[in-house]
Amino acid sequence: MDLHLDRITLVYPDGDSTLTAVDDFSLTIPSGTTTALLGPSGSGKSSLLAVAGGLTRPTSGVVRIGGDVVFAPGGGLAAATRTRLDQIGIVFQAPQLLASLTALEQLELHAHLRGRRPATVRAQAMALLAEVGLADQAHKRPAQLSGGQRQRVAIARALVGSPRVLLVDEPTSALDHARGTQIIELITRLAHELDAATLVVSHDSSTLGSVDGTVRMLDGRRELLLPVHAD
Ligand SMILES: Nc1ncnc2c1ncn2[C@@H]1O[C@H](COP(=O)(O)OP(=O)(O)OP(=O)(O)O)[C@@H](O)[C@H]1O
């Protein structure tokens, strides 16, 4: 199902004043495709991602998955959490893995939180680790993995349970150019295979050759670049 960000505005309180981090921003990401969101520091990329993932409620505008409004101003926290667990995978800038768990266990725990049936979890977790090239690292803990491998575990973990939407915040910032490019290629391929509408926030356009479209953000607003989705 497609991800729609419909006229999203997010205003933060800022002392006696307010700060508009996202300003009437609209974007549709078709199912199975990856869109990169570029823009200078402070332009509102992470704020938009937080709205898209239900971590922050928009001040105005709505987030839809397919035809359903999933996040809107004043929406309930419990419902947002349920939607996030059921339908959205998020990869944060730092992989945020639990130090004491193996790669496989990171995925199994996430599947458990998502309410997946234990009988099916291990096979899917192993398949995802194989997809990200870590089948032979499944029993290693984070400290035994490289930065790029940890990021791959975080991507596989976000995809446990086959979410409709994948949101990725700066996945390449800790990686060199070649590894960063590989991670973006991996995300683009998995989004296609798993039919997830995928948004990747990035500073670095040089790693984004494999994505389906690019949009640029400036001062909270959308600027069009080439190539973009026709939406
Ligand atoms: N919780 C908050 N409260 C108040 N202002 C915030 C908050 N989070 C972000 N901001 C402000 O909103 C604006 C957009 O920030 P945001 O982090 O979304 O930008 P960004 O494009 O992701 O930046 P970067 O690339 O540096 O991560 C900035 O001016 C920032 O200072």
Image (spheres, rainbow, N blue to C red):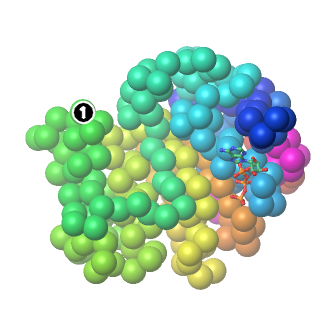
Q: Which residue is mark 1?
A: 115
- x and y percent of residue 111 in the render? 26, 43
Count of residue discs: 1
Residue at 22% from the left image edge and 41% from the top image edge: 112
* Horizontal relation, residue 185 to residue 21: left or right: left
- Where residue 222 appears, as percent x and y from the top left, is 84, 42
Label 1 CB-ligand 1 distance < 8 A: no
* Horizontal relation, residue 195 to residue 57: left or right: left
Is residue 88 positioned above or below 169 on the image?
A: above
Residue 173 drawn at (x, y percent): 61, 71
Instruction: Relative to 186, say whether 23 is above or below.
Output: above
* Left or right relative to 3: residue 189: left
Query: Residue 79 lies in what quarter of the image?
Result: top left
Viewer-nearest residue: 200 or 41: 41
Name which quarter of the figure residue 57 lies in: top right
Q: Is residue 217 magenta?
A: yes
Task: Name above or below for residue 171 compared with residue 48.
Answer: below
- Specify the segment rendered in magenta: 210-224
Q: Residue at x 38, y 34 (%)?
A: 85
Question: Picture coordinates of residue 230 (x, y %)?
Answer: 79, 37
Q: In the figure, residue 231 lies in which quadrant?
A: top right
Q: Is 67 contained in the magenta span? A: no
Q: Secondary structure at mark 1?
A: loop
* Residue visible at 81% across and 60% down in the picture: 40
Q: Nearer the viewer, residue 104 or 14?
A: 14
Q: Mark 1 is on which residue type? A: Gly
| Residue depicted at 87% across the width and 47% down the height | 219
